[in-house]
Amino acid sequence: MKAVAQAAASFLRDNLVPYTSVGVAYGRTLHSVLEYLPRLDLHGIRVVQMMGGYGGRRWKTVAIELVKEFASRLGGEPVYLFAPAFAKSPETRDAFLSEKEVQEVLRMAEEVDVALVGIGGMRRETSLLIETGNFEEQEIEELVRRGAVGAICGTFFNIDGEVIMCDLDKKRIAVDVKRIRERGSRVIGIAGGMEKKEAILGALRGKWLTDLVTDAQVGRWLLSTAKGK
């Protein structure tokens, strides 16, 4: 994670420009990037939270602090999404989505110029979402049985990057990353570790990303897999 975070910080330093809107999801690796990202103080930057908070109070606070700190390092304005990543029920989700402020933030998140996303696996040790998201064990087991290998912004997909529809979608409060890609925006995936290789491969096959920052071992495995096909 340290190597990927260092590489990602260097990549962002070289690629982010003034007057850009930046969407930020949440995850361990993205949080680690801040340890190595220098203060850039770019003009006209806006940093938008792309997914509601999840886990206990501490983790929800950390999600907001992540957006705040990215905005501070880049010299921009933070925009927070004050909602849970997954509501308790579809009805509760609809209530949140009826709020004008939540609608506005999600619209802004969908229209960002650059999105920074982590790629979660399907085990607690490879996904902060699964570790802290208060899911039922059977919900995760069902997703795995249906071929899920990973998730981006709370949307689960298989090894070919195809979305796996599930009941959690009816409770999710987050931007649709596929829509960001369809708009032609840049989506930078930041993830590493061989335990996540299938999730990263699925994200690439599904064209969820325009850019990937990962480690050398995963990179070599991805290239060998591509040559094998």
Image: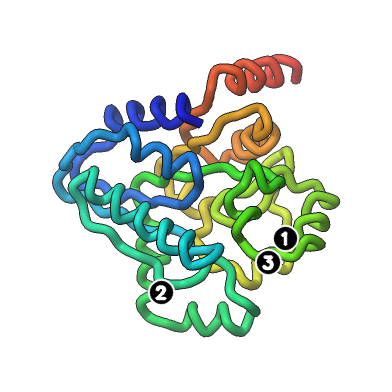
Label at residue 168: 3
Q: Secondary structure at mark 1?
A: loop
Label 2 amino acid?
Val
Q: Which residue is mark 2?
A: 102
Q: Quadrant of residue 130?
A: bottom right
Residue plotted at (62% across, 16% down) = 220
Q: Secondary structure at mark 2?
A: helix
Residue plotted at (41% across, 57% down) = 62
Front residue of this view, candidates 188 and 205: 188
Position above or below: 27 against 58: above
Q: Quick check: marks 2 and 1 in contact, CB under 8 Å?
A: no
Q: How many labels were placed on the picture?
A: 3
Q: Quadrant of residue 139?
A: bottom right
Q: Secondary structure at mark 3?
A: helix
Residue 100 at x, y = what percent? 37, 80
Residue at the far right in the pictured view? 145
Q: How far separated are the C-alphas under marks 2 and 1?
A: 23 Å
User: Is 42 on the left-hand or right-hand side of 5?
Assistant: left
Q: Which residue is mark 1?
A: 165
Label at residue 91: none
